[in-house]
Image (spheres, rainbow, N blue to C red):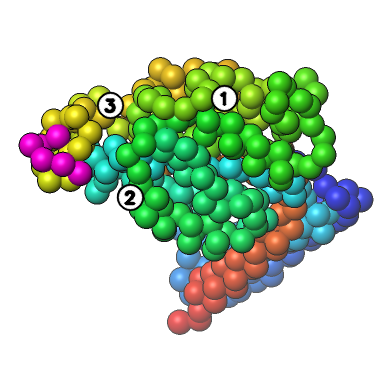
Amino acid sequence: MSFGQPFFLLTLLLLPIMLGLFLWSQRRRARYAVKFTNMEVLAGVVGSSRSWRRYIAPALFLLALAALCLGLARPKVNTLVPSQQATVIIVIDVSGSMHASDIKPTRLAAAQKAVRTFLDHAPKQLRVGLIAFAGDPNVAAPVTTDHGLVRAADDSLGDLVGFGGTAIGDALQAAVQLAHQAVGPTQSTSGNQTIAYHPHGAQSPVSILFLSDGHQTRGTLQPLQGAALAKQAGIPVYTVALGTPNGVLNIAPDYGGTGGTGGFGYPGSIPVPPDPVTLKAIADMTGGKFTNAQNAKTLNDAYANLGSRLGRKPGKSEVTSEFVLIAAGLVLGAGLLSVFWSPRLP
């Protein structure tokens, strides 16, 4: 803990003085008490077994003064504070396998709820963009501080569900390009791709939150090629593998064809296991973190935790108001105890 106005800590020297005055007054009170002629009545009033009670209210009052003195010094604690330039690109797989119901009610519905949870925990000034991808990535919401716009885009993800495959590498490339648009002119050129760039050791203000439920089946870039772009840009990718190893997608027999093939040359039930190995490799390469979400609670908890962490940086937060509230509570407690525990004459 540190203090913005440390010289006010000198006011704490008043506390031992006040404690000394209180003890002195108690001794004077004892000297007058022995002159009381009826000792039986005096014992009934004082109640020797409860004599300790008279010290509690003054002790609370002294603690309240101590809290106020500390509050005057403007105490600050080390914590995570919102970063003004922080940006998070959320990337959600909306391929057909996201209709699988091994994550209740469906994988896609659970992912949409997790995005809302992330926004609930994120700082209000955090800039957020949303990319949905299947065979191709699409920007569902541009980078913005208007979290209501991102929520609306998240609610409409069900309309974007497609059966064109899963292009993980291309989705990562699109996220890096969207990050470049948000970060500004500092850049590097890698082949034909212009990407946001941060020198070695610098901390990027951008993070990518990437969720997929399957293996790469389509796309120009392989997953680790897309991860390499993020790594070169200094952007950590936090990956989530959504789904269970035994997850299946049930396709209606008359969808896009006949004979139970669903028009895709597959039987009515298609195995759709996630690919945790690839997604973990992406997180490890870029300095992010991997989560294997085999149920909705794990997914929601992961997004809540990331919403509380991403977009923040180490800093100091002033807690003066907390000390004032503590002081007010202690004074109130001291007053109530003085009222209820004051000795009464019979």
Label number found at residue 109? 2
Q: Is residue 257 magenta?
A: yes
Q: Residues within 10 Å of mark 3 (few under 14, many from 20)?
A: many
Label number found at residue 273? 3
Pointer 1 and pointer 2: residues touching (CB < 8 Å)? no
Residue 248 higher or lower than 56, as above or below: above
Residue 17 higher or lower than 138, as above or below: below
How far from the left and from the top, in percent, is residue 279?
Answer: 45, 24
Q: Identify which residue is drawn at 35% across, 47% down.
A: 161
Relative to residue 120, is residue 161 drawn left or right?
left
> Which residue is farthest left?
259
Label 1 to label 2: alpha-carbon separation: 26 Å
Relative to residue 108, is residue 341 drawn left or right?
right
Q: Amino acid at mark 1?
A: Gly
> In the rendered image, is residue 74 in sight?
yes
Q: Secondary structure at mark 2?
A: helix
Q: Identify which residue is drawn at 24% across, 48% down.
A: 105
Label number found at residue 226? 1
Quarter of the figure with the N terminus: top right
User: Bounds of the magenta span?
Assistant: 256-261
Q: Amino acid at mark 3?
A: Pro
Q: Residues within 10 Å of mark 2 (few under 14, many from 20)?
A: many
Q: Identify which residue is drawn at 61% across, 43% down.
A: 88
Q: Quadrant of residue 236?
A: top right
Quarter of the figure with the C terminus: bottom left
Q: Quadrant of residue 172?
A: top right
